[in-house]
Image: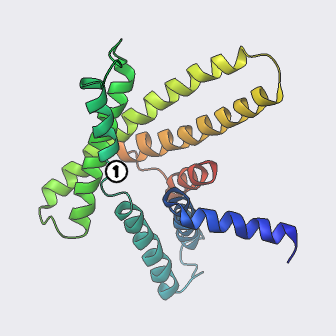
Amino acid sequence: MSSTNRNAIDVLVRLTKDREGKDKMIKIIQYIGKVVLWGMKAGPAGEKRWSLENERVVRALVDNFSMFRKMIRLFDWVEPLHEIAEYVMPAGNNKGKVDMLAISRSVFDLVNTVADDVYCLYKMKVIQSKQIGEIADVQSNRAWLGTICIDLRLLFEKRQTILQMKASKDRDEALKMNTVSILKLTCDFGFCAVHDVFEWRLSPIYQASLGLGSAFLR
């Protein structure tokens, strides 16, 4: 086996062993599926490019992978809850100036992850109330937008710090990673703000492209 193939397999193994890596892979497949679904209907009216059965298969893949990604993120609210507890009741000699931006981010993250879990349970039909499911979906999206905005601000602040560093390989690498993170969050912002929060119903390719871009840049 060539070294290139071995390295590719090693990367694949690391991705599938890690939850975030597995989520990334599935997100890429999910949004490629959404692009395919858009392509199925993008031809001239009346043109039959794909069979109805093929469309059902792709749609089932997209929907089930979306649900799987929700399920593997269940109980993610534990981390922001722990962060808030640390801010409110700091241990030992950690008492000091309160970072309101960090607290705000943790609160947004807590609301987002709790609402995500409620919506996931609704989709699983554990919670039967449609009203509760819809409220959870709305609050989850709004809170996610809040975390995105704070993360973007922090990344731009970090960028200013990096730019002030002396030219070096480490500086160039840090700047590159910072740029990738900003682009990724910009895709998330466009996806969340336009499609989920303000509900501007643009072409499905808009949402699919931003979701795919975010997955690749993650």
Residue 102, image x and y in percent? 39, 25
Single out the residue that lies furthest toward the front.
Answer: 92
Instruction: Judge from the rendering whether residue 69 lies leftward or rightward of residue 40; answer left or right.
Output: left
Is residue 20 placed above or below 78 in the rendered structure? below
Residue 77 as seen in the image, left or right of residue 169: left
On screen, 49 above or below 10? below
At numbered mark 1, what does the secondary structure look like: helix, strand or loop? loop
Residue 133 rendering spot, x and y as whole percentages: 20, 57
Residue 113 vs residue 76, the one in the foreground: 76
Give the residue drawn at x 40%, y 68%: 68
Q: Quick check: 214 above or below 186?
A: below
Q: Residue at x 27, y 55 (%)?
A: 117
Q: Determine which residue is flagged by label 1.
A: 76
**Relative to the observer, which residue lies in front, 73 or 38?**
73
The amino acid type, in three-letter code, at marker 1 is Asp
Total number of numbered discs in the rendering: 1
Residue 82 percent location from the top left of the image: 30, 38
Q: Residue at x 78, y 65 (%)?
A: 7
Quarter of the figure with residue 128: bottom left
Q: Please name whichever residue, 92 or 18, is drawn nearer the observer in this view of the structure.
A: 92
Q: Does the image show residue 142?
A: no
Q: Quadrant of the N terminus?
A: bottom right
Q: Quadrant of residue 132?
A: bottom left
- Expressed as whole percent of the image width and height from the top left, the position of residue 31 reads 54, 62
Single out the residue that lies furthest toward the right: 2
Colour scheme of the rendered structure: rainbow
Q: Front-most of 187 and 8?
A: 8
Which residue is at 22% across, 55% downward?
118
User: Is residue 91 rendered to the left or right of residue 46?
Assistant: left
- Horizontal side of residue 72 vs 122, given as left or right: right
Classify 10 Å Cα crowding around label 1: few (below 14), some (14-19), many (20 and above): some
